[in-house]
Amino acid sequence: MKKLKAGFKFQKLPGKLVERKFFEDSPEKVGPRLLGKLLVSIDAKTGKPLAGRIVEVEAYLGPHNDTPDAAAHSHRGPTPRNLVLFGPAGYAYVYSIYGLYYCMNISCEKRGLAGCVLLRALEPVAGIEEMARNRGLGKDVPMRMLASGPSRLCLALGLTRSLHNGLDVTDASSVLQVREDGFPEADPVITPRIGIRQAVDFPLRFALRGNGCVSGPRKLAEWQPK
């Protein structure tokens, strides 16, 4: 796991670390509770934090569930690619898509159960100019454009599989952390997940109600049980 070197000085981070026990629950419960928390990526050279408030997530169920989640990477069991998901809760699972972009999940539940939450969108909070630069955008770009969508999120914070996969987001010495700054508990919008072809009806997408940085706003119609 990549940690900050001994004696490394970095700027004071907002709030406090979220503890591992927060993630040791089913992803459909962890997901909505993550809304409003901060994802912080620390530049290992400068110590400067890039931070965004989590405003949209999706839950993916482990293979132990009675209802199979064919859209989950863990659906067919552990592989070299998804092994982080089968470990302890609170670790980053970063994977590539199309060989060009990355998406970030956080492992949930107890070791071996492989549930996770995909981070879909952030509202930028700190290091906004750096985020824009990471995205190749000008400093006057609307904030909703910086980290709205799972790949944009990773680009904005400089997250890659080689550097961030397997990091413990509950460790104060990690360069990738999830933190709590007192943001009030959310009453989320709940919809089916988007951008997938299997298990498309599961109501496992959670978004911060009324937030302009949520991705896919055209698909924010709330799920209604049939």
Image (tube, grey):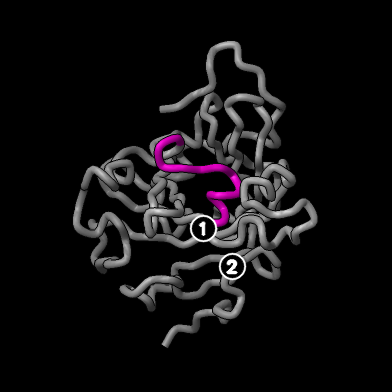
In this rendering, would 141 be left or right of 60? right
Instruction: Establish if 52 lies above or below 45.
Output: below
Residue 139 percent location from the top left of the image: 77, 51
Q: Residue at x 43, y 60 (%)?
A: 59
Position of residue 159 in the picture relative to residue 61 (left or right):
right
Amino acid type of disc 2?
A: Ser
Which structural element holds mark 1?
Answer: helix
Q: Is the Cβ of the residue at disc 2 closer than 8 Å to that at disc 1?
A: yes
Furthest-right residue in view?
140
The magenta stretch is 150-163
Q: Residues within 10 Å of mark 1 (few under 14, many from 20)?
A: many
Read off the residue under disc 1.
150
- Residue 223 in the image: state x and y as whole percent: 50, 80
Q: Which residue is mark 2?
A: 215
- Residue 170 screen position, x and y as percent: 50, 34
Query: x%, y% of residue 74?
Result: 27, 54
For the C terminus, which image quadrant? bottom left
Residue 151 lies in magenta, yes or no? yes
Q: Give the amino acid type for the residue marked by disc 1 in the picture.
A: Pro
78 relative to 24 in the view: left or right: left
